[in-house]
Amino acid sequence: MGNRIHHNRAGFVFLAAAVLVIASCGEYSVYDLLGSQQEGLFALTQTEVVTVTGAQYALAATGGHTEYSFTKLSGPGEVSVDGVYTAPAFITDDDNVAIVTATDRVGSSDSAKITIYDRLTADPLSTTVPMGTVSVELDVDITGGIGEVTVLSNTIEANTAVIHDPVHDPVLFYTPAEPGKDRIELSDEYGSISVVTVTVFNPDVISIDPTSAIVAAGETVEFTVHCSSGDFDIEPVDESDGSISHDAGSDTFTFTASEDLSEAAEVEITVTSSEGLSATATVYIVIGEDPGPLNVSPSNVEMNTEGRVTLTASGGIVPYVFELAAGGGELMEDPDGITAVFTAAEQPGTARVRVYDRTGDFVVAQIRVKKN
């Protein structure tokens, strides 16, 4: 018993001496170092990471002495000092691997290899089909992503969307049983999501495609009218907003926004068939450059329990609305109307945040929460 106490005491003396040497060479006191010591040797919890463009990944470490710091050694993307890696928006085949190094308080280090893939994308993001009961192949090119592509949801329940050959050459088949604007969420195995909008029109009634459009002042947008009789009238719009051009017998017309507008405007265009049926479309006129499609950044996040991330919306038409569509956690919109802060739950899981713009379109950020 006496020998064991002697050996334990000797070990403690040796450790204390080592700490004193380290402390004498740096800025830390003995009490700081002893208080920061964690159980086990210093190491990253994951040294091989897979992510997609535009995503964030929270690296974590254990053991050694806190606080830990992180730096990027090589490759694309950026890493914060507390270990949040942000993948670039674009990659090339020969530059899709980043090396991030983590260091503890006394200089112990470990590195992680981060491989970045193109996120799942669909092109175009919107298409139009006539109503019917037969499944049709949508003219949408699905690229990027990791692994199998699946359909998460669609907003018109009567209609169905199915992916054929989800791994090698995903093709989207769709049954347009009910008219309306359907939004289909596609996801890969990693959780990158692309939303395809399908406008289903009834050939027996009048409709306008698209039902909404964004155009810069002085620019032109084209509409197609679906009408069984082929004969329709277009109500004139306020000349201060723009002008409409339509050739007799054509099923298309154009709207040109006025160059003289000094502020954004919203114009409603109404068409009426010879049977007296009407349909409307909304044009959102912006000042300056076209804002581009609605987007949320980061669109994919992997973070620790109780971690936080700021989601930022851009493109589309303001105002934006953030909605926690699935999973746990807390979502709080900032007063700026452009960002929202998501705080992860105490338990691991997956959350999906939808961001809507004024047109009703939405994009999705998927957040995977892991154990610290």
Image (cartoon, grey):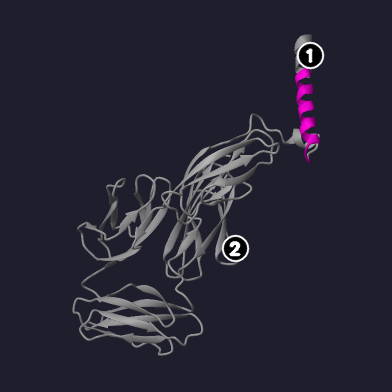
* Residue 231 in which image quadrant: bottom left
| Nearest the eye: 286 or 108 | 108
Can the viewer see residue 184?
Answer: no
Residue found at the very far front of the displayed protein? 94
Question: Whole-Å distance between the Cαs marked 2 and 1?
Answer: 60 Å
Return the x and y of residue 107 as percentages of the image width and height: 68, 37
> Does residue 185 lie above or below 59 as drawn?
below
Mark in front: 2 vs 1:
1
Residue sitting at x 53%, y 52%:
77
Q: Position of residue 369 (x, y in %)?
A: 52, 45
Give the secondary structure at mark 2. loop
Image-based side of 38 in relation to 272, left or right: right
Residue positioned 47% across, 56% down in the render: 89
Q: Position of residue 159 (x, y in %)?
A: 28, 58
The three-letter code of the residue at mark 2 reads Asp
The residue carrying mark 2 is 334
On screen, residue 368 versus residue 126, left or right, reads right
Residue identified by numbered label 1: 6
What range of the chain is rendered magenta? 10-27
- The answer to if 72 sits in the magenta stretch is no
Relative to 362, is 210 above or below?
below
17 or 335: which is nearer to us? Answer: 17
Quarter holding the N terminus?
top right
- Circle 2 packing at 10 Å, graded few (<14), some (14-19), many (20+), is few
Residue name at image x 50 percent, y 44 percent: 114
* Quadrant showing the C terminus: top right
**Residue 248 seen anywhere in this rendered image of the structure:** yes
